Amino acid sequence: MLYAAYGSNLDPARMGERCPHSPLQGTGWLVGWRLTFGGEERGWDGALGTVVEHPGGQVFVAVYDVTDEDAGMLDAWEGVEIGLYRKIKVRVHMLAGDVMAWLYVLDGYEGGLPSALHLGVMVAAAEAAGAPGDYLADLRSRPCRSLGH
């Protein structure tokens, strides 16, 4: 099963710890989507990352070939069992061609600010995955809650 990671799971080292049997297949783009945040009341330190459909938007992703065992562990990590996130299938544009993959979307409304820490983790993960400079600059420019607020 192919999984498209757009948040902290973009980081190959982090995915190697969470899903040790699931190799990175490459990177690509969700075209017609945008990265946003929501569920501020459900996150322990601010809003949580998610993606929503958006004409003209695009989100950088890393695609992993996830085993069933690793998918179960990742579902638990992402809070699928408690209704925090749900899985959907999307088309990912990769250099070698389009692939179908699943990803997690927040099961809640858009809105709220992520913590500076959460946003920093997302930027570091995108950087580790090789995201282009303009994508990283956009992430770094997003508003966030300062530490302690």
Image: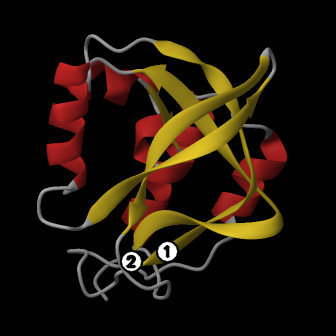
When the figure is inspected, residue 55 is found, relative to residue 64, above or below; the finding is: below
Kindly indicate the quadrant of the structure image that contains residue 97: top right
Q: Which residue was labeled with disc 2?
A: 47
Q: Residues within 10 Å of mark 1 (few under 14, many from 20)?
A: many
Q: Measuring from the top left, give residue 69's x and y in whole percent.
A: 17, 21
Residue sitting at x 49%, y 74%: 37
Residue sitting at x 24%, y 67%: 84
Nearer-the-camera pick, 113 or 25: 25
**Separation of disc 1 and disc 2 at Cα?**
6 Å
Q: Measuring from the top left, give residue 139's x and y in whole percent.
A: 66, 60
Residue sitting at x 44%, y 82%: 145
Residue sitting at x 47%, y 82%: 113
For numbered disc 1, what is the local secondary structure?
Answer: strand
Please give the label number shown on residue 1. Answer: none
Q: Is residue 73 left or right of residue 123?
A: left
Q: Are marks 1 and 2 in contact (CB under 8 Å)?
A: yes
Please give the label number shown on residue 37. Answer: 1
When the figure is inspected, residue 8 is found, relative to residue 45, above or below; the finding is: above
Q: Measuring from the top left, give residue 135's x and y in whole percent.
A: 76, 50
